[in-house]
Amino acid sequence: MPLYHTEDQAMLADTARQFMADEGAIARQLRHFRDIGCKDGFGHTLWKQFAELGLTGILVSEGDGGLGMGHVEAGIVLEEIGRNLTPSPFLTSAVMAASALADASAELKGRYLPGLLSGDSVFALAIDEGKKHRPERIATRAVRSGNGFSLSGAKDFVVHGSSADMLVVAARTAGADDDAEGITLFAVPRDVAGLSQDAVRLVDSSMATHLRLDNVQLDADAVIGEVDGGREVLDRVLSAGRVGAAAESVGVAQGSFDMTTTYLKQRKQFGKLIGEFQALQHRAAHLYSEIEIARAATIKAQQLLDAGSDKADLMVSVAKAKAGKAASLAVKEGVQMHGGIGMTDEYDIGLYMKRDRALAEFMGDMFYHADRVAKLSGY
Amino acid sequence: MSELEAFRQEIRAWLEENCPPEMRQPVHDEDDICWGGRHFQFKNEAQKLWLTRCAAKGYTVPDWPQAYGGAGMSPAQAKVWREEMNRIAARPPLSSFGIWMLGPALLKFGTEEQKVHYLGQIARGEIRWCQGYSEPGSGSDLVSLQTFGEDKGDHWVVNGSKIWTSYANKADWIFCLVRTDKANKYQGISFLLFDMESEGVSTKPILLISGYSPFCETFFDNVKVPKAQIVGELNRGWDVAKYLLGHEREMISGAGGGDRLTTIGAVLNRAGLEDPLLRAELAMFDVDALAYGAMGEKFLDEIKVGKAHPAQPNMMKYAGTELNKRRYELLMAGGGSASLEWESEASDGGSRARGWLRTKANSIEGGTSEVMLNVISKRILDLPGA
Ligand SMILES: Cc1cc2nc3c(=O)[nH]c(=O)nc-3n(C[C@H](O)[C@H](O)[C@H](O)COP(=O)(O)OP(=O)(O)OC[C@H]3O[C@@H](n4cnc5c(N)ncnc54)[C@H](O)[C@@H]3O)c2cc1C
């Protein structure tokens, strides 16, 4: 399959670009909800609009009422989200939670998919434990109790946790903390007894929580997939989140880069446009290369995931690491090349820097993923 | 089975039958590369057989039209061809400046006669070409070149000199930038083809830091070039030259170049490396290399259907060559003192150290990295004054 968008995908990209540039623009969404101190950190009206376009069901199979598309298509939407810094639960709900629910029982699907498809529900993922993404190690326990399970443990960096109607929780039903096997995924409703969340606003104005589970009682039908066999589902959810975050990072990089090159063509110093200085030109041209390469790696990873290739794991980590590297360079160069104005809250370039920082941590940073590339390559 | 899948089966079967086992070994040194030409010494029978068999089917230039010695493959078929070649680690049957550089320029700018004549020779590996662009005073600022062709009615008389002419002493013909109008800088250059055995052509090899001397100073002393041997219009050679440079840069970038830019972490770590900082550098390199591999694939896919930015080969060359230099730095570090050996048999005559030094030219030849960045600034980013 060629590494560019098909005609259908290009059409989707046009729609997503227009939609996000109009409705998801920085002033209308990110700044607005930040400035009013919104507890969700995003707008529900926009989320409903995502649903009206069918986008909340982009990864939901047609049989289940969704669009039945793949990671390439989800990535198209995410790149536009990144470009406009549009705050939304798309990545957590429509990409990651939807990937988990794809493996769920008809009963669970029936309980949660309609809300996703209509844009009434928001979902979150409770995977990380501690400050860094280390999903190989899961200490949260789920022990059999009554006709179900009792969950106890602590989770961090639960993005949109306090806005979520349902949280996908990765817990351990067997084995030691570091075992690959013995994981089970649960669909946990927000209002269940014993679940508490401490909401925190992050540097990019998005909201996350520290989550605690104290003997949270769940029926057996809350299990997504197989008991003890959740690692496979979790890996799929992680891949979806990682490649999705990579696509969003590419958008962040591109948005920041476009702002920066525009500025290079406007700002004058020493009687010249600053874009005439070769020192800046070369850095801009280098950055251009890095962004192009990151986008190629991301599309490759999306295609491999959609094709179910056994090389997908490796390429997903390559994409997450490379996109993270490119975006990090883009926002740093962006601020620097704007000079003093780049440090002001009034100017958008700093917002890109903040969003990049949060995305970089989400689902593993470039160091985690470079290490994973090494391990998958046998060293 | 789709048509393309059937094609893949056909190619796979043909390769299985026709690619000699010796031609499925990694390329070690210059000798392993088949350059073709009048005086080419085949290293062994297998090399010769492989060239002959491929040339007969048009597989030395699979995507050129059949009328000009190619196999007329579509972009999708050519991709299958590359994938199947890579699958069995087959060496290219023929490598040449004719294939990478002159061929594409002739396909675009040549007359029908020129195409049939020169492209056929290139495809069959009969004539080896060299590139006469750079001059002592004109490197990055190529358009300032001085080699002059005086109009003598039915021919030009060319005087001047070129430098850094790769393999000039081994080449049969040269494609050469010659000034034909001194009053006009850009529109005063013509793109001429001539035989290196013409009277008045001489070459002098230059020794490189790697210890090899694959490039030369090339001198022209009243060389007669018939008028039919011009590509494109008189004084419009710069257009041809630039178009050719795009292809040269694409080639040097290593896009789709099989194993040239693959990962190295696993290779080096098999040798028992224990340095965690080196491992970290290798992992970061492998991320970049695999990402660049995807870029190469995307670039080739896009260029075949006209979706790539016309200046994108400059980006590819910049990124690919900087990556290859980094690769060799890491290979040297991973090899430790063993990689310093220059002559020993164990080091295969110092192949790693020599290879490392050779890569330093990647970001100079065909336009320097700085020039690539200038071109990206100007043609892709549209930055002012660039
Ligand atoms: C191995 C090898 C093989 C070659 N083969 C051939 C061949 O077959 N045929 C042929 O014609 N040529 C060949 N070349 C020549 C090659 O194309 C030139 O070396 C190259 O174009 C650079 O020119 P130069 O060496 O004169 O360097 P210069 O142009 O003098 O450059 C010196 C330094 O200045 C920098 N610089 C120059 N201009 C600018 C600018 N505007 N902005 C910023 N920095 C600048 C350069 O990047 C470089 O770092 C080969 C070179 C090598 C190393």
Image (cartoon, rainbow, N blue to C red):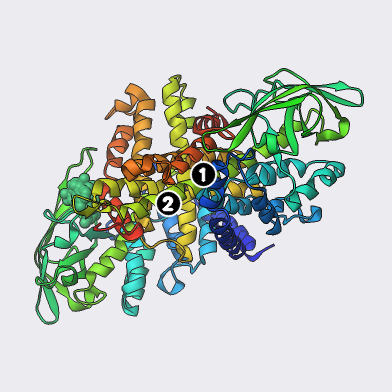
The amino acid pointed to by label 1 is: Ser
Which residue is disc 2 drawn over?
B255
In front here: B120 or B340?
A: B340
**Where is residue A46 shown, x and y percent of the image?**
64, 52
Judge whether A184 appears above or below B305 on screen.
above
* Residue B374 as seen in the image, left or right of residue A181: left
The residue depicted at 53 percent of the width and 53 percent of the height is: A25
| Residue farthest top in this picture | A176
**Where is residue B243 shown, x and y percent of the image?**
31, 65
Which residue is disc 1 drawn over?
A249
* Mark 2 burial class by Cα count in 10 Å: few <14, some 14-19, many 20+: many
Disc tally is: 2
Judge whether B155 appears above or below A153 on screen.
below
Where does the C terminus of chain B fall, quadrant-wise?
Answer: bottom left
| Residue farthest bottom in this picture | B153
The amino acid pointed to by label 2 is: Ala
| Residue B258 seen anywhere in this rendered image of the structure | no
Numbered disc 1: what chain?
Answer: A
Numbered disc 2: what chain?
Answer: B
Judge whether A163 appears above or below B280 on screen.
below
The residue depicted at 79 percent of the width and 27 percent of the height is: A228
**Where is residue B200 shown, x and y percent of the image?**
10, 64
